[in-house]
Amino acid sequence: MGQTIKILIADDHALLRRGLATLLGFNKGITVVGDAKNGEEAVKAATELKPDVVVMDLSMPVMDGVEATRRIREALPDTHVLILTSYSTSVDVSRAMEAGASGAFVKDAEDERLVDAIKTVAAGGTAFSPEIEAMIRNDPHPPELTERQHKILDAASKGLSSDQIAAHLGISTYAVNQHLDVIRRKLGAQSRTEAVAIAIRKQFLKV
């Protein structure tokens, strides 16, 4: 990376993209080289522009920020990602970090803090706003579920019975019930309904 930090901004709100570009434009050593309005565009732009840092929103159409982060980091290991979000949970941030993000900040963070975070991430460090640090500390990441368990829990959230889930996934009803038992233990739930409620509250199950 040279002396000038090249930035790509990915957010589905045009006003935020313009505002952030203006803010960063006032800082010597930082240049905004492009922007994107969804995750798919972010991956394409990053591949073409090879920025030092992608400032990435989590919630975007077509492809979300987590998947875009994963693809960018896989294709461009020298490009770092700083998540910038208006609302998220510890699960969202944890998923982004697992995908390769180097930090996360809230969108209403102080300008100087955000600029410092970008510089830290560009240098290979990590940076989190105090609000997100507190959120992670107070709301620990829930236990990991397998892909099959996620599918079963998602089906259960839609009101499907064990027999219906089994038919849908092509497995036995006994296997479905075994998976549900494991899911309940992982989530600390007493019932299928409580497991679904916990998953929705933690926002790693979308309904």
Image: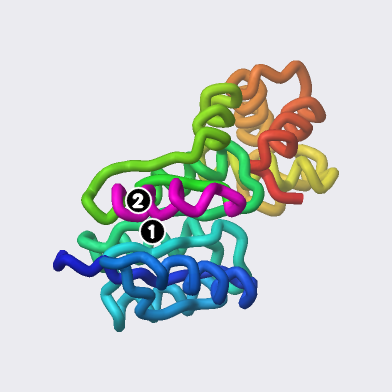
The span shown in magenta is 107-120
| Amino acid beneath label 2 | Gly
The tally of labels here is 2
Left or right: where does residue 84 sit relative to residue 4?
right
Residue 31 location (% of width, % of height): 33, 73
Residue topped by disc 2: 100
Give the image's coloring scheme.
rainbow
Of residue 85 and residue 114, the one placed in the foreground of this image is: 114
Q: Using residue 26 as the reference point, say whether residue 145 is left or right of it.
A: right
Q: Is residue 115 magenta?
A: yes
Which corner quadrant of the image does residue 98 belong to?
top left
For residue 89, the mark is none
Residue at image coords 42%, 67%: 24
Q: Residues within 10 Å of mark 1 (few under 14, many from 20)?
A: many
Question: How far apart, in angstroms, are the residues tagged by discs 1 and 2?
Answer: 6 Å
Where residue 10 appears, as percent x and y from the top left, is: 49, 69
State the residue lying farthest toward the left: 2
Residue 181 vs residue 85, the one in the foreground: 85
Q: Is residue 114 visible?
A: yes
In percent of the image, x 78 and y 47: which residue is there? 164
Question: Please, which residue is most extreme toward the bottom here?
Answer: 48
Residue with the mark numbered 1: 70
Q: Are marks 1 and 2 in contact (CB under 8 Å)?
A: yes
Residue at 62% x, 51% y is 170
Tell me which label, 1 or 2, sits earlier in the chain: 1
Describe the element under mark 2 as helix, strand or loop.
loop
Q: Nearer the viewer, residue 97 or 152?
A: 97
State the residue at coordinates (67%, 35%). Answer: 202
